[in-house]
Amino acid sequence: MQTYNENSTLLQPRSRRTVLKWSGSAVATIAISGGLLPNFGISSALAADLGKGDIGVLNYAYALEQLEAAFYMKVIDSPYNDMPDAEKLALTDIRDHEVAHRDFLKNALAEKAIPDLEVDFSKVDFTKRESVLGTAKVFEDLGVSAYNGAGKLIKNPDYLLAAGKIVSVEARHAATIRDMLQPGSVAFADPEVVDKNGLDGAKPSAEVLKAAGPFIKTQVTANSIVGMK
Amino acid sequence: MNTQPFLGRLDPELVSRLVGNRRGLFTSAAKSLGLFASAPLVLAAASSEVFGAALPKQIVDTLNFALTLEHIEDAFYRTALEKNFIPKEHQEVFTNIGLHEAQHVKFLSGALGSAAVKRPQADFTAGGKYSDVFTNFDTFLTLAQTFEDLGVAAYKGQAGNLMENGDILTAALQIHSVEARHAAIVRRIGGKKAWDSAFDEPKTKEDVLAAAKPFLKA
């Protein structure tokens, strides 16, 4: 069933391709900023192409927002033990934001949107605060660095602005989650995420997808967002 | 982890373009900044020399606008920390924020080189309206939130003007999200939500300057 990815691996020049094989059943193969992956007679239900250029970048963001939205929905559906009211309020807001981001991107992409991703949170213990907030911290910092890294690839200034409207909210989330984990400390913007020039992270798509990989069942092939290294 | 130096994160082709064929310029930039200047600052200085007049006016103007805001923030936290009125439990946070603002000033100044605007003269009482800004922690927090949220909205509003240069745009976005982290923590310290909604709105340069104007000496 999953011959598509193998075929493309054989046929794609190595330098143009970053193939990430993710665990779990292969439901769909997604080419980030595709156009490079030929569709070897595989049905469109199994292979979704992110499209070129801005569409590819928006689908990349859409994939991450799907992951975050699914995560926080579960967090609020099954709160960790003794979740304080203040934390529930903040996490509910964050869930609502991620759902709004996801829906905004889906709406903007319309028929060009990738399918729903199947997520895998089996490594997260939703009854434990440390496990939930620790995962949230990873997702939020990753989201910030993903948007920061992808901004320069966007051609349409309206899309760049839309991404900007989302990324600073992700940064607010990141600071909040980090402060929940280490209250009153400099964790909100410590050297783990802010460098010596006072700059936040900016990661290439391959690195982001690799980090997100363990949480996504859907097999995703990141097929070189142009300009990303 | 994000401890990798900026230079290391730059496209190697860009680095070689900036530095590789212009070792003399790179060395002179290093000399002018001193032996211990960080690699990114030297690179930034070298790049501003390299690009010089070639750096488009739109980008110079935008970076100078950003630098003006960073100067205001930098002076704000530096003054506050000198006045020694910030409650002990929050001093570490504001020291960290102040450090970032100083780093932003350095970074942008380095990128602009001789085109950088001068540090503006600030009046954080806004002509007496906030006379207790550096004695009353609540007043200070109100202004800190104002400056941080304003910074986020300002960078966001200017991103489109930096699209011509991907590396400069990326650096601006990296500052933008740090300002958002600051805004979030300042709001939390003030007992507020760290956000207004799912989407942060941008502000135009005119709106930002109008909001900053009361804090600048004429």
Image (cartoon, rainbow, N blue to C red):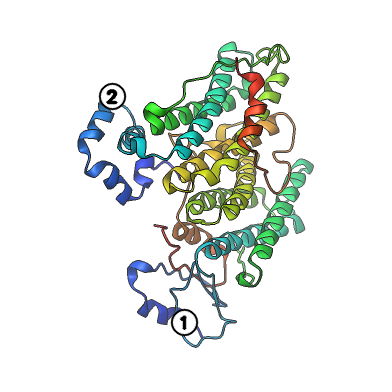
The amino acid on which the numbered mark 2 sits, given as a three-letter code, is Ser
* Residue that appears at 67% across and 52% down: A128
Which x, y percent locates residue A40? 46, 85
Which x, y percent locates residue A24? 54, 74
Which x, y percent locates residue B86? 64, 18
Q: Which residue is mark 1?
A: A4
Label 2, residues with CA under 10 Å away: few <14, some 14-19, many ≥20: few
> From the viewer's perspective, is A36 left or right of A213?
left
Q: Quadrant of residue B76?
A: top right
Q: Are marks 1 and 2 in one subunit? A: no
* Residue that appears at 34% across and 35% down: B52
Label 1, residues with CA under 10 Å away: few <14, some 14-19, many ≥20: some
Residue B137 disc label: none
Q: Is residue A163 visible?
A: yes
Indicate the secondary structure of the residue bearing disc 2: helix
Compare residues B165 and B39 and report the one nearer the observer: B165
Indicate the secondary structure of the residue bearing disc 1: helix
Q: Which residue is mark 2?
A: B32
For the C terminus of chain B, the quadrant is top right
In the displayed structure, A44 sits above or below B88; it is below
Q: Quadrant of residue B150?
A: top right
In the displayed structure, A194 sits above or below A109; it is above
Compare residues A179 and A30 and report the one nearer the observer: A30
Mark 1 chain: A
